[in-house]
Amino acid sequence: MTSKSILITGCSTGIGLHAAKALHERGYRVFATARQQKDVAALTEAGLESLPLDLDNAESIEACFKLILEKTGGTLDYLFNNGAYGQAGAVEDLSTDVLRQQFETNVFGWHHLTRLAIKVMRQQGHGRIVQNSSVLGVVCMPYRGAYNASKYAIEGLTDTLRLELSDSPIHISLLEPGPITSNFRKTAALKFRQNIDWENSYHTENYQLQLERLEKKGATTAFTLGPEAVTKCLLHALESKRPKLRYRITFPTKLFAVLKRLLSARAMDRILTKG
């Protein structure tokens, strides 16, 4: 029996790495991709089929996808769009170029890859796409405007795609994790220092608190789960006869989804600005 093939983006650490290893052990043919060659080498060393894929580069996306099709004989069963990062900073301190870069990685790269996958999946008569969104695709939080916007965009594109694919054999699901153990905060702190003139901002005092939180070693919340919580939902989205449209992962995501339905926008604002 031929193994089911899956392309996963953002496999260097965290959710993508755990998912790639778990699915490989389960018998999937996993194409674990990463942007940096050192991460591709590490994934290969771990026994995975790994390829370079830079979500900011259309040529890289197309070259990687073409190579995978060559390896599989022209098919791809599943796509897990996961690679992303979080750009922190108040909206007024985000340059348009920094916001554009957030969308290049978190939205446009996914869109390009998804279009390639849909074409193949329509031709072969089956396929599933899973998009790793976030609790910040459900509610917004201060100083997360770029990331909030990118995840809201993914939610909107995915909901639209689901309607457009309703008469096709392709299913698309959203994962919406809250706090998950990963290097996400470390990367967010690095991007913040690179791209935000935080010491000369109106928000300097709040930024200092944000940096302390992001850079505190081992910092987690009481509701932080391991990446296995996401992999569990990913497996359901891939294998269930009736996959969910949305998988809300961690208590904060579930709570905010309920509160958003029950409370007014002003009441939600009061809660979120205290967070």
Image (tube, rainbow, N blue to C red):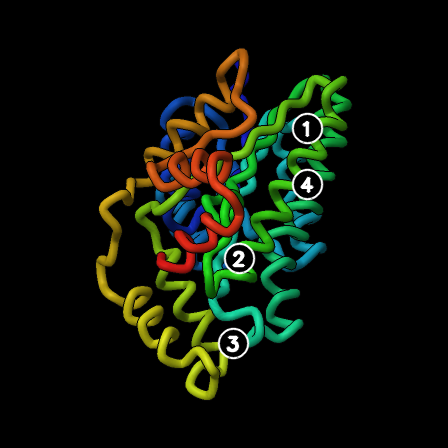
- Can you tell which mark lies on residue 195? 3
Three-letter code, disc 4: Leu
The C terminus lies in quadrant:
bottom left
Cα–Cα gap, marks 2 and 1? 22 Å
Counting every numbered tag in the picture gives 4
In percent of width and height, residue 223 lies at 27, 43
Local crowd at mark 2 within 10 Å, few (<14), some, or many (≥20)? many
Q: Is residue 150 above or below residue 204?
A: above
**Viewer-nearest residue: 69 or 231:** 231
Cα–Cα gap, marks 1 and 3? 35 Å
Label 3: which secondary element:
helix
Residue at 25%, 66% (x, y): give it: 216
In percent of width and height, residue 60 lies at 66, 54
Q: Is residue 11 visible?
A: yes
Q: Are marks 1 and 4 in contact (CB under 8 Å)?
A: no
Return the disc, 3 or 4, that comes first in the chain's sequence.
4
Q: Are marks 2 and 4 in contact (CB under 8 Å)?
A: no
Callout in the foreground (2, 3):
2
Three-letter code, disc 2: Tyr
Return the disc, 2 or 1, that comes first in the chain's sequence.
2
Label 4: which secondary element:
helix
Q: Quadrant of residue 66?
A: top right
